[in-house]
Image (spheres, helix red, strand yellow):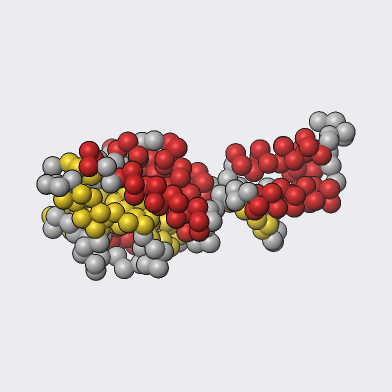
Amino acid sequence: MNNKIRKAERLAFITKALVENTSKIYTLNYFSEQLDSAKSTLSEDVDLISKLFKAMELGEIRSISGANGGIQYVPVLSREQIEKEQLSLCKELMDPKRIITGGYLYMNDIFYNPEALKKIAKILATHFVDCEIDYVATIETKGIPLATVLAELMNKPIIVVRKSARLTEGPTIQMNYLAGSTKTIKTMALPIRALERGSRVLFVDDFMKAGGTAKGVIDLLKEYQVTVAGVGVVMSTKEPVKKLVEDYYSIIELEDIDEETGEIKIYPKKANN
């Protein structure tokens, strides 16, 4: 690039880089080399972008200190934005047409819709933004799209716990666990090479009733000498009140599904759990 790049062009380049690579840390040296501009000038540009993002509630531009420091874009939501998305999700899921025989809700259209998933993932990313993690983990199958979008927002690799070992993934650790909702014994497996020992992991899933799956994943990850730094789910049930996992975050809470009347009771879940 030439050395006559205008301010508007610098702002566009910096903004594009930050937004397209959420949570990635960029040094001012990088932008200085790319734009052939003084770091003092670029610092002013970043400050302007940061103020605009804050005013428009588009997330935060954060400064990271230290040898590996720089700037990064974190797509966090305001409290008002989260409440709006929670209510919108509840409204969408309370459609009686979603009721499936047996007291279940059809949710596949949401978990396979990129736009809907990104909104949900941003809520989780906001809640866990200050939780230092190395991986985002989930269990197949509906949790995979959610974890993938969240991992991209947080700039972390994804780990998928399988329901059975796969030959193509090499040696695995398998564990039996008690599914809290059905009281049945199930199996989960994770390749030995899936993650580094001593890492910190965020586990996310689409649904939690008694918490048996989440507890099973936590117990499995202990075999890898890692720390489960957080557990996040899209929807949890009001009952049972006491889950097998005590510390978790849920976006919305399901109280009841009445198949006879078609009434579905779902509410935003406050972030105090």
Q: Quadrant of residue 209?
A: bottom left
* 127 in relation to 88, above or below: below
Q: Quadrant of residue 180?
A: bottom left
Measured as percent of width and height from the top left, residue 90 is found at 34, 49
Tell me: 69 left or right of 116: right
* 236 in relation to 15, above or below: below
Q: Residue at x 30, y 45 (%)?
A: 93
Measured as percent of width and height from the top left, residue 243 is found at 25, 65
Tell me: 210 left or right of 195: left
Measured as percent of width and height from the top left, residue 36 is found at 83, 38
Q: Residue at x 78, y 37 (%)?
A: 8
Tell me: 273 left or right of 78: left
Tell me: 268 left or right of 11: left
Q: Residue at x 66, y 39 (%)?
A: 17
Q: Residue at x 16, y 50 (%)?
A: 258
- Residue that lies at the very extreme toward the front in this rendered image: 261
Report the quarter where the C terminus lies: bottom left
Q: Quadrant of residue 1?
A: top right
Residue 265: in sight, yes or no?
Answer: yes
Residue 205: in sight, yes or no?
Answer: no
Nearer the observer, 64 or 238 = 238
Nearer the observer, 106 or 136 = 106
Nearer the observer, 70 or 10 = 10
Measured as percent of width and height from the top left, residue 107 is found at 29, 41
